[in-house]
Each structure stands twice: as C-alpha cells, then as structure tokens.
Amino acid sequence: MAKENKDFKFEIANELGIISEGSKGWNLEFNQVMWNGRDPKYDIRTWSPDHAKMTKGITLNETELRRLKELIDREVALLDEE
C-alpha cells in the first residue's frame, strides 16, 4: 500500500527481512521500496511498526547491492579466520 509523507510518496514493494528488532517496536529492515512512484530500490532503514514512519537509511540499486554483498562476504571471511 502506498503511503505519503508531506515531501514524498513511498511503497514497500517487497519486505525482504528484519535485520534487528528494536525495543520499542521499530525494526531495522531490508526491503525493496518504491520512492515517488519509481522502480523499487533495495533499502536498509529503521521503520515504525505500521511502516508509516522511518529513519534515514541507505538505498541501493542492484549494482550497489551486489558490490555491498562482495564487501560483506570478504569481511565475514576475515571474521571467521579470527
């Protein structure tokens, strides 16, 4: 369902998963979000329980998502060596 802020419109196209749960119901989530009617982008940010409010976050296109995965995989491999 599309929602509207005074400055922009957004719709969560696909809820991909919760990264962490906050103590007051707000969750850090990984989703695909359509901003102002544009094609969905990958998005990491904290959302209120009803998804009406959110914090600042990070929005990525597919190329950026794939690069981030490479960087995370490399870091996790280093952590596993410890």
Image: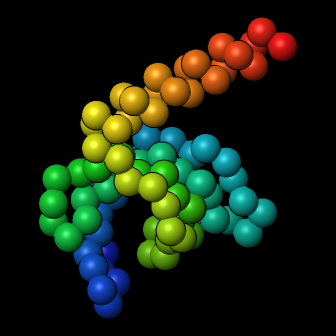
The x, y position of residue 33, in whole percent, is 32, 56
Kindly identify the residue that appears in the image at 56 percent across and 27 percent down. Answer: 72
> In the drawing, does residue 32 fall left or right of residue 74?
left
Residue 66 visible at all: yes
Q: Is residue 10 left or right of residue 47?
A: left
Quadrant location of the C terminus in the rendered image: top right
- Residue 28 locus on image (x, y percent): 59, 54
Quadrant in which residue 77 is drawn: top right
Q: Relative to 5, say whether 34 is above or below.
A: above
Q: Nearer the viewer, residue 6 or 16?
A: 6
- Screen quadrant of the N terminus: bottom left
Q: Tell me the residue at 29%/49% (across/down).
A: 41
- What coloring was used for the rendering? rainbow
Name which quarter of the figure residue 26 lies in: bottom right
Residue placed furthest toward the bottom: 6
Q: Looking at this view, is 29 or 76 the one in front?
A: 76
Q: In this view, does 82 lie above or below 46?
A: above
